[in-house]
Image: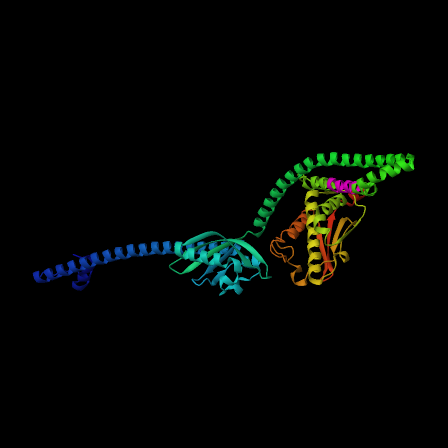
Amino acid sequence: MHSLLERQLRRFFRGDSPTDPRTVQLLAAISDAYQAFDDDRKLLERTLALASQETEERYRALQQDIAARQRAESERDAFFLASPDLLAIFDTNLRIIQANPSWAHTLGHEPSELVGVAFDTLVHPDDLSTALAGAKSVTETGHVRDIELRLRHRDGSWRLVNTAGTMDTKRGLLFAIARDVTEQRQMERELAQAQKLEAVGQLASGVAHEINTPVQYVGDNVSFSSDGFQTLFTYLDKVHALLTPEQKKQLEDAAEEADLDYLKAEIPPSLSEAKDGLRRVAELVRALKEFAHPDAGEKAPADLNRALERALVLARGELKHVSRIETALGSIPLLRCHVGGLSQAFLNLFVNAAHAVEERTRVSGVSWKEHVIRATTRVEGGDAVIAISDTGCGIPDAIRDRIFEPFFTTKPMGKGSGQGLPLVRNVVMAHGGRIEIQSKVGEGTTFILRLPFETPSGIREAA
């Protein structure tokens, strides 16, 4: 009999037990019901305990999953916020939904300002077709990479970026990353240009060497001929003085046929001009050999005045028909530098000056005789100062801040590539120097290069 029923009966019958068969049978049935209830209750308790345990385990797993998701989101947000690359999320219309802080650092645009902005408004017009083709590719294939575009900086300049993207088709979102490669591509172009210049320089040096030998013996022969003709004419004058009047009269026809007086008057200046031309050729060859000589790996002492003169010689073809040239080269001690790079910078400034003067002449009709391109050098404080000025068209204020941008040029197609002044800036900066510009539209421009000596004592020792 069930223990609970037995205790209840004991209290009810006060220790006696019922003897009636039907009562006993009923009590047995009730006891079985009690026992069945206990069995069901225990089963239910075990079931509830197992369910509770399973629920607790699921809860712990859910908590762990939530924590893992929160960590992943936190790490994702950290990468999104800290990445130096441009990260952005776009909708299917290529409007920016979210942008990371690197946009402000790289392009000057605050992320909050970019929300809702159409991407094509930031792309250079010439690169828009490439951008749209990339967007179409990413929607069709799910991803795209290695597309280079120019994006507009807040100040109006352009930065070259390499982009990649992937598409979340379920949510209709495009995730894009862009890396600023402006300096990298500039360095690659400068390296390629340097390699090209080195190859051209080696060729030019070889050609200059080959030209030098025939120039020397042609020069020697011209000098010999000049001296010989002078001696010959002196001899003829002495012979003519010894002739009788009858003999002179007999030789008049021969002298007139030979145009002897003309030859005597013209041969000496002709040979003198030939000697001057050969001297200029020899000077050009020497300048070409020095200009083409590659810089050593380390800086070496160099004469800036000589480098400036060599650059003038090489630029003479651009300068001589557009302006007078003046120089005022002061006493400057040797400067430890890469003289090849500085020579290239000087040459670029002279060529730019010639183009500026030529442009002013074309616009205003000022005669080339009224123009001056002037080069001066001096020591000022701890700097070697090189100033190259012109009386050209000048630099408008609107573009003065952009003249050192790679590929920026106001010259017509084929006249300039926008590489000259950036190269000048890079060379001067590589020497720890700085550039100052003084310019007025319609009057001219002066570029002032300040190159520091290594120490003030070095100046005194060199001086």
The reply to whether residue 123 is visible in this rendering is no
In the image, 222: left or right of 43? right
User: Which image quarter holds the C terminus?
Assistant: top right
User: Which image quarter holds the N terminus?
Assistant: bottom left
User: 397 and 347: which one is in front?
Assistant: 347
Q: Quadrant of residue 253?
A: top right
In the image, 412: left or right of 231? left
280 in magenta: yes
Which residue is rendered at x = 59% and y = 44% of the image? 192
In this view, 60 is above or below 309: below
The image shows residue 356 at horizontal and vertical percentages of: 69, 57
The image shows residue 353 at horizontal and vertical percentages of: 71, 54
The image shows residue 400 at horizontal and vertical percentages of: 67, 59
Range of residues picked out in magenta: 271-282
Q: Quadrant of residue 354?
A: bottom right
In this view, 140 is above or below 333: below
314 in magenta: no
Pick out the residue farthest to the left.
Answer: 21
The image shows residue 341 at horizontal and vertical percentages of: 68, 45
User: 312 and 242: which one is in front?
Assistant: 242
In the image, 308: left or right of 52? right
Which residue is rendered at x = 64% and y = 52% of the image? 422
- What secondary structure is the stretch in magenta mostly built from? helix
